[in-house]
Image (cartoon, helix red, strand yellow):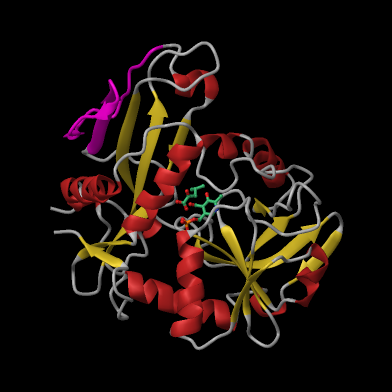
Amino acid sequence: MKKDIDWKNLGFGYIKTDYRFVSNYKDGKWDEGELSTDSEITMSESAGVLQYAQTCFEGLKAYTTADGHVVCFRPDLNAQRMAASCERLEMPVYPEEKFVEAVEKVVKANIDWVPPYGTGATLYIRPYMFGSSAVIGVKPAEEYQFRIFTTPVGPYFKGGVKPITLRVPDFDRAAPRGTGHVKAGLNYAMSLHAIVDAHKQGYNENMYLDSATRTKVEETGGANIIFVTPDNVVVTPKSSTILPSITRRSLMYVAQHYLGLKTEEREIHVEELKDFTECALCGTAAVLSPVGEIVNHGEHIYLPSGKDRMGVITQKLYDTLTGIQMGRIEAPDGWIKVIQ
Ligand code: PLP
Ligand code: COI
C-alpha cells in the first residue's frame, strides 16, 4: 500500500524510506550486496571519507508513468558516470550492470514510497560510495561501501516552476584539470559557503564561471545550464570542468529530434548573457528550472521570455522531457528502464 504522504506538497528533503542497498568492498572485491533496513552507518574514526573526503555520488529518479508502471530514466548513464568518478578518486568501480540491478532492487523494495502519477513528486535515488577503512597518510582507503537510498521528493526550488535568480559569484567551483567533471562530494563541500552566501543576499543559486579566465559560463552548484537564442537555438556551455549532466544531454537530443531545433554546445562568454531570450537550469533534481534574472556584479540581466513563467522553448523542452519520463511520449530506445 502507498505510504500516507501529502505527495503534492513535498519539498526536496530527506525522508527515511524502508530499504537501502549496501555492498562492501574488501580484499580487492565487492560482496554480493543486500537490502538493509538499517539507515545508520558505523565506521572507523579515521575512514578515508571522514579524513580526506573520499566519496562520490549519483542522483536519479523513479517515476510512476501515466499507465501505472514505475520507471527509471537512463540509469546506465549514472552507472557510467559513477565509474568515471570512482576512477578519478582512486575508488573501486562498482560494476555498471550491478549498479543498474541494485537501483532496480532498491526501488522495488521501496515501491510504496514511489509517488503516484500526477502528483508532481518522484522518488529520488541516491547511489554513493565512500572510503570506509582507516587512512592517515594521504592515500586511498582499502575498504569501501557502496549504498543506494531513496527518498520521495518534490521540486528542488521552492515555488515550483517560478523563474529563479542567479548571481555570478566571486567563488570558483572547479579548477582546470580538477574534479569538476565528476560527481565528487568535495565539489559540493566547497560550494556550501557560496550557496549560503548567495541565499543570504537573496539569490537562488550561483552561476559559476570558468576558474581559469572567469570569462565563460559553466554551471550552478547542482545543475547544468541551457540558453535559448532569439532565433530559437538551444545553447549549452562546453567545458571540461562541468558535470556531464544526463538531463542536459537528453534535452539536447530532445531539442533536435523531437522539436526540430538547432543546438550548440560551445563556450559561452559572460558578455553574451544579455543576448539570450531564455535560460534554465537542468538536472535530475532541478528538472528544467527557468531563470528569470542573472546578476553579475551589479549588472542585472533579465531573460525576457522567462520573467514570470517558463519561456516558450523551455516549456516545450520541459513538456517533452517529462512526457518521456512519465510515459506520455514515446522514449528513444534504451532511455526508460521499467522496474518489474
Ligand atoms: N551539475 C551538477 C554540479 C550536479 O550536481 C548535477 C546533478 O546531478 C547536474 C549538473 C545535473 O546532472 P544530471 O542531469 O545527470 O542529474
Ligand atoms: C541531482 O540533480 O541529482 C543532484 O545531484 C543535484 C544535487 C545537488 C541535489
Question: Splitting the image into 4 quarters, where does residue 331 fall?
Answer: bottom left
Residue at the right extreme, as displayed: 298
User: Where's residue 1, x and y in %?
Assistant: 12, 53
Number of numbered callouts drawn = 0
Residue under the image location 28 percent in, 22 percent down: 26
User: Where's residue 52, x and y in %?
Assistant: 54, 22
Left or right of residue 24, residue 221 in this image: right
Residue at the front extreme, as displayed: 28
Question: Splitting the image into 4 quarters, where does residue 44 fall?
Answer: top left
Let me know if residue 4 appears in the view: no
Question: Splitting the image into 4 quarters, where does residue 308 fall?
Answer: bottom right
Q: In the image, which residues are magenta? A: 20-44
Residue under the image location 65 percent in, 43 percent down: 177
Does 107 appear in magenta?
no
User: Where's residue 23, x and y in %?
Assistant: 25, 32
Does 25 appear in magenta?
yes
User: Where's residue 93, x and y in %?
Assistant: 36, 38
Left or right of residue 215, residue 278 in this image: left
Left or right of residue 300, residue 153 in this image: left
Let me know if residue 15 appears in the view: yes
Q: Is residue 232 above or below residue 267?
A: below
Q: Is residue 89 above or below residue 99?
A: above
| In-front residue for pair 311/332 | 332
Q: Is residue 312 above or below residue 340?
A: below
Left or right of residue 327, residue 216 in this image: right
Q: Quadrant of the C terminus?
A: bottom left
